[in-house]
Image (cartoon, coloured by chain):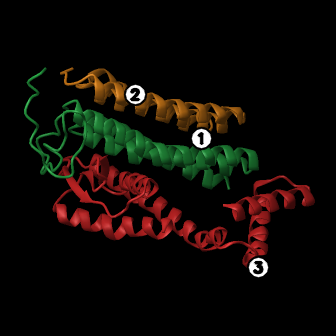
Amino acid sequence: MRAFVHNVLLAIFWMLVTESFTLANFLVGFAIGFLLLFLARSLFDPTSRRYFTLAWRLPWFVAKMLWEIVLSSLQVARAVLSPRMRIRPGIVAYPLEAQSDLEITLLANLITLTPGTLSLDVSSDRRVLYVHGMFVEDPKAVVESIRDNLEKAVLEVTR
Amino acid sequence: MSFLEGALIALLLTLPFAVYRLVRGPTLPDRVVGLDLITTVSVALAALYALVSGQTAFLDVATALALFAFLATLGLARYIEYRGHRED
Amino acid sequence: MLTLVYVLVLGGIFFLFIAAIGVVRMPDLYNRMHATSKAATLGVGLILVAVAVFYWDLSVAARALATLAFIVLTAPVAAHALGRAAYLSGVKPCEDTYIDELAGHYQKNHRLESVEVKPPAPDPSE
């Protein structure tokens, strides 16, 4: 977190020095600042140093998330526009591996934004997440696809 | 009529669908879904109008509307949860 | 650059239309929420990105992207709150619903158990 603040400060400083307050110039300053901080990474304590591994993983995570949103919207579009709606809704229990609030929140949000699934509720003991699916051919397949595609990605970013 | 003005009118045409769901129900949560869609479309309208008019201040309208819509939906969901079973 | 803006706006309107038609056509509340939580989010998001691309200015882009981030983070939360409230208030999934593993897991006090529990015997003092 501290490394991120440093990075933003460096980007603002870059804008001040170059006297041009545009988005493109901010991004250039941010990239240069990141490079500088990366070269000086041994000066940070280990917890702040997580910023640098996260900086590689987070863009991937966000890109993947956006791609999933596009896919799911296209799937909804296909279901909505087909004259005979071929949907097979169902509510499935998903056994959670994620533990902390952040992990469960992220996973539940991602499940809602990904194709065909919508998270309804978490059990009070945080062991099970109930998911409403639009195309449930086989409950086991839904659980497996959530575990392989989403939970792994979430845990990679948070742990 | 420019392209963006046409887009604005096209966006307005989605509102009747949401209003249909708001009026027809059949249950209160269904009406909330319709209302939610109306505010979402309004956010899009405000953002699009920022393009058409060249006034970036309308972007702030979109932000405030998005904040308000979230709180409204949460409040209504809370109300639905605690008023108990009812058919309407 | 202007072509990109037009494509983004067109895409946004397309997905908002999908959400609107879905809200009318879908058979029950839970399926309707699929339409509003996914397609409508993407539609608004594309239009906000179009604004950011059109002005290509730091203050505008920051506001547009902040709004976008807020919508992407809150739309699923709103859908979750509404879906849970609807299930608790007794909105039934439609007849096509193929499996319902949530049925019978809610307690009287809205606690949700991970295994099915018989409702406790009524308290005689009440």
Q: Amino acid at mark 2?
A: Leu
Judged left or right of residue C125, residue B47 is: right
Judged left or right of residue A7, residue C121 is: left
Asked which secondary structure carries label 1, the reply is helix
Q: Amino acid at mark 3?
A: Leu
Q: Which residue: 27% across, 48% down?
A: A123
Locate residue A59: give its quadrant: bottom right
Residue designated by label 2? B35
Judged left or right of residue A61, residue C104 is: left
Residue designated by label 1? B3
Q: Colour of chain B?
A: orange
**How many numbered marks, from 0 up?**
3
Q: Which residue: 40% across, 27% down?
A: B35
Chain letter of disc 1 in the image: B
Q: Considering depth in this image, is C116 or C53 the residue closer to the camera?
A: C116
Residue designated by label 3? A39
Mark 1 vs mark 2, foreground winner is 2
Q: Which residue: 71% across, 61% down?
A: A2
